Image: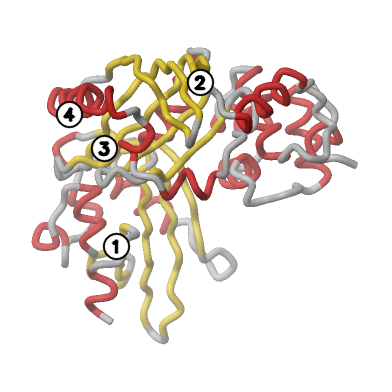
Amino acid sequence: MDDLFTYYTDAIVIIHENQGVRTIHTINNAFSTITGFTSEQLVGQDIATIQPDTANTLWGLINRLCATFSEHKTSAYAECNLTMQGDKPIFAEVHIQQLEIINAVYYTVKLVDRSEHKWIEEMVLKQNVVNSVIYTSGGLMTSLRSYRNSIPYDRYKLSLKHNKEFVIEEDQARVHNFFNSLRESRQSGQITYTLRLFEDRYLTTSLIQPFYNADDSFKCYAILTLAMNSIHLSKFGQAIRKQTQAFKSDMRDADIDPAYKLRLLMVEKKLSVTQLAENTQISLTTISNIRNGKIKKPQRLTAHLIAAELGVEPGEIWGD
């Protein structure tokens, strides 16, 4: 079980509380990677003394959230900018759950670094973006979103492809070297290349931003497609283009995913998840879950508040 916890992919820290003092009980490898703190630095430490308690420190946030727990409240969630070891800033989700153990109080804290998602969200509000993709250090796709029309290709099949398979052979070396140069320089950059989607080809311009963990290891690339023009389309691709050209922005179309409609409206209104949550007084967790499709149809009042903020009727997003 210890090995299972140590190598678990989610970043977890377990905190023990005794007489109001909260100390680090244990952390796993993923937590060290994200935060830059080692087990030797943390285990046994009072979380109130690890970092100065400012608005952006992880430990100060955890301490404040744990202090809100009661007999009727045993979990907490926050989404905000945090400062990690070495003053590295990240945008993170923090999930805290109190463990029910007789005569002892423990908390599990899960930390999710969503810096690349936050960057994409902010850039979509500034630029005319076709779609966004996130690739891990191993070249695997972990996120794919479209901001104009729904993606006409099989998402599952796309997710199985290695990133180099999306570039024609003539461009692969140039694109590979460009990505490596960004990784080394830690800067964003723009490149034009020929994108390969199965039998179809597109002249594509992308903006790429590399991301890193607090321990300085490389994390992922976030990629925004700024332009995408067809060069060669298979019969399937031609049919898709005709379908796209014929597509009318009828938000009542039952075939369109409500989460996709919501994302389009948010882009159109230049509203981030945080702004929508603040304007509607709906929790960030709920807004995020609706936007990501985890909540298929929100409660009536929630749907009304969101739709009103976006200038539409609830039925135009979620149907009748």
Residue that label 4 marks: 180
Q: Nearer the viewer, mark 1 or mark 2?
A: 2
Residue that label 2 marks: 232
Residue drawn at 52 percent across, 17 percent down? 230
The answer to whether 197 is drawn above or below residue 9 in the figure is above
* Mark 1 element type: strand
Q: Earlier in the sequence, mark 1 or mark 4?
A: 1
Quarter of the picture containing the C terminus is top right
Residue that label 1 marks: 13
> What amino acid is labelled 1 in the image?
Val
The CA distance from mark 2 to mark 4 is 28 Å
The CA distance from mark 1 to mark 4 is 33 Å
Q: Earlier in the sequence, mark 2 or mark 4?
A: 4
Residue 278 on image: x %, y %: 60, 30
In this orientation, which residue lies closer to the viewer: 200 or 134? Answer: 200
The answer to whether the residue labelled 1 contacts the one labelled 2, judged by CB atoms less than 8 Å apart, is: no
In this orientation, which residue lies closer to the viewer: 95 or 100? Answer: 95
> What amino acid is labelled 4 in the image?
Asn
Graded by Cα atoms within 10 Å as few (under 14), some (14 to 19) or many (20 or more), the crowding at tag 4 reads few
> What amino acid is labelled 3 in the image?
Thr
Residue that label 3 marks: 83
Residue 134 on image: x %, y %: 39, 37
> 226 left or right of 52?
right
The CA distance from mark 3 to mark 2 is 47 Å
The answer to whether 24 is drawn above or below residue 291 in the figure is below
Residue pushed farthest left? 40
> 52 left or right of 255?
left
